[in-house]
Image (spheres, grey):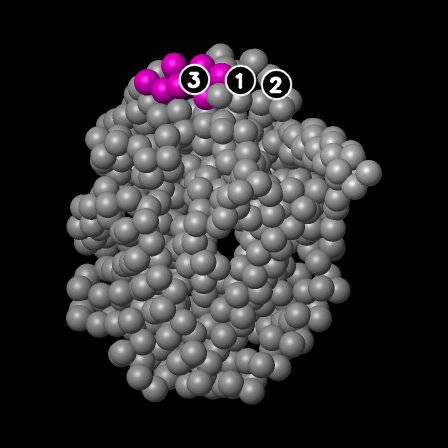
Amino acid sequence: MKEVYIIFGKGDRSIFKISVAIAVVFVLIGVLIPEQLGVAMEYAQSFTLETFGWFYQLVATFFLVFAIYMIFSKYGKIKLGKAEDKPEYSRPTWFAMLFSAGMGIGLLFYGVSEPISHFSAPPMGSGGSEESAIIGLRYTWLHWGLHAWAIYAMVALALAYQKFKKDAPGLMSATLYPVLGEKVKGPIGQAIDVVAVFATLFGVCASLGLGAQQINAGLEYLIGIPNNFGVQMLIMGIITVLFIISANTGISKGIKYLSNINMSLAGILFVVMLIVGPTLFLLNMFTTTLGSYVTNLTNMGLRLSPFDEGEAAWTQGWTIFYWAWWVSWTPFVGMFIARVSKGRTVREFTVAVLLVPSLVCAIWFTIFGGTGIHLELTQGLEVSGQGLETALFFVYQQLPFGGLLSVVTVALITTFFVTSADSATFVLGMQTTGGKLNPSNRVKVTWGIILASSTAVLMYSGGLAGLQTAIIVSALPLTFVVLVICYGIIKSFNQELKEMEKLERSETKVKRKKAS
């Protein structure tokens, strides 16, 4: 595999130049003809959701089944690295990095707004009822739970194995070497890497856009700063400088330290919300929703409602969008998780990435979303009438220490913003420099500027809908790539087991000779 690394390296500059050129053209189109860009993206979104919704549901379920199989299969003992390799980071730090790079901003943005939205407008039946409260929370768990982390886990698993076991570059194309062989060294491999770059770019743009909107909403609540596009662009500019500085310090400094800060602040928010909120109600909601989630997991993951246009539109706008979002994040989150997972076994890795984050997400949405639902059910407050970015701060207003919670939240969103963005520039740098573990500062700065510019263009041309469209369209071709990656995992692991068995037989023969 050393040979693979050398040949891949020859395409570094071309992938970087092609990706940057396309990104610059996209930004220019958004600046010069934003309305036309918005119309085109809206059409692309509708076509993709209506035509490929069934496909996304099937593949998301397949990835979950595949991940569970990895846990219990004979492949579980395979190590993601050489026999002597040990994990580089402790488990707490590993989890902190994973969350900060994965779903940090989204947990805050959607923590209250998504469960309360599903509560008032559920996928089936009438809203505002006790039944819709359970349904709303259950579907939030679906979108942020096992399916999502299974998608991440499979891509990260392939990347980590190829990188640390076979010394391949940290590229999406390298994960397909077991299937495509020498073809990944040419135009096919470069095309796959370019697709991965833009899926990463647009997937992260969505999170940055959400973060800018919610920071603005928090500042409006705290000190009366106007909530508008201009202020959000100013926020983007300031944080762009911060995350470029952080990215240039390297993964073991800026990203590591900020990730630990994120987890500490998130832990504080979580504990305080549980205490000052309706604690007993939330514990009961968690237990009830857990039973409902487990019972209905298969049906929810494959639901499309072909006979009801309203229910079908809900599934397309929420569930299918999320599956596309998570797929678009797989090159980014997958590479980042792989980068920090050296030395772990397949079983340990898959259990950790699949189960632990899913449980934490479920608890988080129960605490924050459940508090919003309780306020609306018991006190008649219009939590569901708030905007997506303001619902969290509205809930804070009804609780003790609401002002302090808002300050901590704005700080946490900012640090999540920085870690998500600097992790993205790090990964984009890896993707466009042949998988280098430490891309140059020049490359990271270039991608930091492009990332911020693309986010601004998408927000200006279509707002949140524009961000969603970019995700859905860019994720479709990548979904096929991830399916092939799963096949490549099986091929690689079967070969690995054969080599392990051969080595064990040789060692057994040696021991027998010594004994005789």
| Amino acid type indicated by mark 1 | Val
In the rendered image, the quadrant that contains the C terminus is top right
223 left or right of 303 in image: left
Count the marks: how many? Answer: 3
- As for residue 12 lying within the magenta part, the answer is yes
Can I make out residue 98 in this image?
A: yes
Could you say which disc has been placed on residue 338 in the image? none
Nearer the observer, 357 or 304: 357
Could you say which disc has been placed on residue 184 in the image? 1
Q: Relative to residue 31, is residue 466 depicted above or below?
A: below
- As for residue 464 lying within the magenta part, the answer is no
Nearer the observer, 303 or 199: 199
| Amino acid type indicated by mark 2 | Leu
| Image depth: mark 3 or mark 2 in front | 3
Mark with earlier residue (3, 2): 3
* Part of the protein shown in magenta: 3-13
Could you say which disc has been placed on residue 6 in the image? 3
Task: Give the structural element (helix, strand or loop) at label 3.
Answer: helix
Task: Give the structural element (helix, strand or loop) at label 1.
Answer: helix
Kindly report the secondary structure that dominates the magenta region of the rendered protein. Answer: helix
Task: Give the structural element (helix, strand or loop) at label 2.
Answer: helix
**Marks 2 and 1, how far apart in space?**
6 Å
Q: Which residue is mark 2?
A: 180
Do the residues bearing badges 2 and 1 touch, measured as CB atoms within 8 Å? Answer: yes
Do the residues bearing badges 3 and 2 touch, measured as CB atoms within 8 Å? Answer: no
